[in-house]
Image: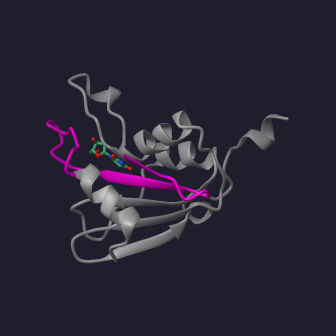
Amino acid sequence: MEDELVTLARRAQARAYSPYSRYRVGAAIEGIDGQRFAGCNVENASYGLTICAERVAAGAAVAAGVRQFRRVAIVTDSDPPAPPCGACRQFLREFGPDLVVDSVGPQSHRRWSLGELLPDAFGSELLA
Ligand code: THU
């Protein structure tokens, strides 16, 4: 599977800053208006400050004024392809449960809905 969103995520993966884990992640998220934003993981010598690629991509979108998303693509060197971590699931859920999540590894790809990955999520509707 190699569409434009995956290509964008792949380019971002090449820019991953991951000197500690050596695990490179690229992500690209597409708004319902078609705009796309990329991110990579950014690690830190204070390990817990690391930011995942998915959150960097979603943050870039929000900073550009885009808050409604169709799909996120993730590229790693893992097979089976890596699902987003729990923190990223919750972060992405903020913007809706219907997001399609595509993850691409060297040999195969997987697709989920965010709702499948994070059932019974905590969301803003519960704060009312
Ligand atoms: N990582 C991501 O970028 N996204 C995820 O969903 C899982 C983990 C990064 C964080 C860290 O830089 C490296 O992968 C290893 O955990």
Q: What sort of colour scheme is used for the picture?
A: one colour
Of 5 and 47, nearer the camera is 5
**127 left or right of 41 in image:** right
Look at 66% across and 52% down and name the residue there: 96
- Please give the range of residues in magenta: 14-38
- Which quadrant is home to the N terminus? bottom left
Image quadrant of residue 62? top right
Residue positioned most to the right? 128
Total numbered labels placed on residues in the image: 0
Residue 94 percent location from the top left of the image? 63, 44
**46 left or right of 103 in image:** left
**54 left or right of 90 in image:** left
Is 28 included in the stretch rendered in magenta?
A: yes
Note whether 93 is above or below 8 in the view shown. Answer: above
Residue 36 percent location from the top left of the image? 46, 53
- Which quadrant is home to the C terminus? top right
Residue 101 percent location from the top left of the image? 49, 63
Look at 18% across and 42% down and name the residue there: 21
Look at 51% across and 42% down and name the residue there: 61
**75 left or right of 97 in image:** left
Image quadrant of residue 117? bottom right
User: What is the chief secondary structure element of the magenta stretch?
Assistant: loop
Residue 125 percent location from the top left of the image? 79, 43
Look at 21% across and 44% down and name the residue there: 15
Note whether 54 is above or below 45 in the view shown. Answer: below
Image quadrant of residue 81? bottom left
Is 52 included in the stretch rendered in magenta?
A: no
